[in-house]
Amino acid sequence: MEANTIEPATENQSSPITTAALLDHWQGQRRVTRRVIEAFPEDEFYKFSIGGMRTYAGLTMEMLDLAGPGIKGIATGDWSGNPKFGEEGHTPAPTTKAEVLARWDATTDYINTIWPQIHPDRFQAVEAAFGQYPNVNYGTLLYIIDNEIHHRGQGYVYLRALGIEPPFFWDRS
């Protein structure tokens, strides 16, 4: 295999994780991230940043812009739900944290609805996610999860700088 060549797994390779376990892992990560959002004081969620990074509201919208359209693309091959880019780089945040949390919950429900419809072969398909990023679909999914964890880490730094103890990262219940 040449460098930078994407090659999907073959049928006779064993899987280190089931799709159900992968969904459970992702949803566990999403539960922790939701608690990070909840921990922010309303005004700081929209205005606090360190070192020129985006606010946590802006980072949260990026996570949402990737998760919903991303799972749709993985499930169907329809990547037309290309993340929207606004002033902060993605869809502008609703005006209240409660609205953001409602959108978070709706996306979680959407993921849970779409997931069982994903044919196993879709995880191995090589596609240009959002029309721009060629990868094996499971790689794109792992990117979406990693991106959330990365931005949640920024949220932990923000919360600590605000004197707020962040939720335990290991408690995914």
Image (cartoon, rainbow, N blue to C red):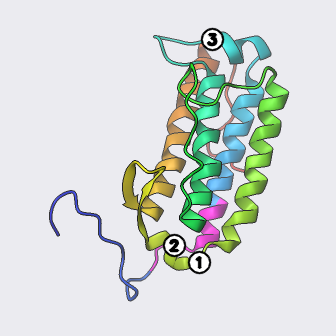
The residue singled out by tag 2 in the image is: 122
Marks 1, 3: nearer the viewer? 1
In the picture, the disc for residue 51 is: none
Determine whether label 2 and label 1 are within 8 Å by CB.
yes
In the structure shown, which secondary structural element does the residue marked by tag 2 occupy? helix
In the structure shown, which secondary structural element does the residue marked by tag 3 occupy? loop
The residue singled out by tag 1 in the image is: 119
Q: How many marks?
A: 3
The residue singled out by tag 3 in the image is: 48
Report the amino acid beneath label 2. Answer: Arg
Question: In 3D space, how far apart are the residues under numbered discs 3 and 2 (Cα atoms)?
Answer: 39 Å
Question: In 3D space, how far apart are the residues under numbered discs 2 and 1 (Cα atoms)?
Answer: 6 Å
Towards the viewer: 156 or 150: 150
Determine whether label 1 and label 3 are within 8 Å by CB.
no
Taking the view exactly as shown, the residue that stands out farthest to the left is: 2
User: Relative to 54, is 83 above or below?
Assistant: below
Specify whether residue 23 is painted magenta: yes
Marks 3, 2: nearer the viewer? 2
Quarter of the picture containing the N terminus is: bottom left
Report the amino acid beneath label 3. Answer: Phe
The magenta-colored residue range is 15-24
Task: Answer with mark 3 or mark 2, whichever residue precedes in sequence.
Answer: 3
- Give how far across and how far down residue 41 sits, in percent: 77, 16
Taking the view exactly as shown, the residue that stands out farthest to the bottom is: 12
Q: Quadrant of residue 100?
A: top right
Q: Quadrant of residue 86?
A: top right
- Give how far across and how far down residue 127 sits, in percent: 41, 62
Task: Answer with mark 1 or mark 3, whichever residue precedes in sequence.
Answer: 3
- Give how far across and how far down residue 88 sits, in percent: 56, 21
Q: Residue at x 56, y 52 (%)?
A: 80
